[in-house]
Amino acid sequence: MKILVNGKEENANSGSTVLDFLKSRGFDPALVSVEHNGRILEKEEWPEETLNESDELEILFFMGGGG
């Protein structure tokens, strides 16, 4: 199925959860936050939040550094 991830169309397996999708793309759950269809998800929701056709994910990365 097709979903939008950070504004780009990507394929996801039907029935995938947010956590399944993140793992399939190699994202470290400790280093990202996820917005699903306009709602920021708590990490505890990721294993149960199922993706559907045309859903939108925004994956935000935590960056270290500064100076």
Image (spheres, rainbow, N blue to C red):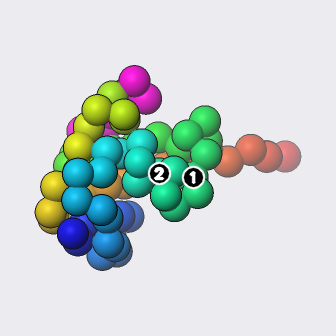
Q: Position of residue 35 (x, y in %)?
A: 33, 44
* Amino acid beneath label 2: Leu
Q: Position of residue 39 (x, y in %)?
A: 24, 39
Real-space CA distance between mark 2 and mark 1, rounded to the nearest whole angstrom = 5 Å
Quarter of the view holding residue 29 = top right
Left of 10 or right of it: where is 50?
left
Q: Please report the residue visible at 58 percent of the width from the left and 57 percent of the height from the top.
A: 26
Residue at disc 2, secondary structure: helix
Q: Is residue 45 magenta?
A: no
Q: Please report the residue visible at 47 percent of the width from the left and 40 percent of the height from the top.
A: 33
Q: Is residue 49 above or below residue 14?
A: above
According to the image, label 1 marks what residue? 27
Quarter of the view holding residue 44 = top left
Task: Say whether residue 23 is visible.
Answer: yes
* The residue stretch that appears in magenta: 39-44
Q: Are marks 2 and 1 in contact (CB under 8 Å)?
A: yes
Which residue is at the front of the view, 38 or 2?
2
Q: Please report the residue visible at 23 percent of the width from the left and 51 percent of the height from the top.
A: 15
* Residue at the extreme left: 53
According to the image, label 2 marks what residue? 22
Q: Earlier in the sequence, mark 2 or mark 1?
A: 2
* Residue at the extreme right: 67
Q: Is residue 42 magenta?
A: yes
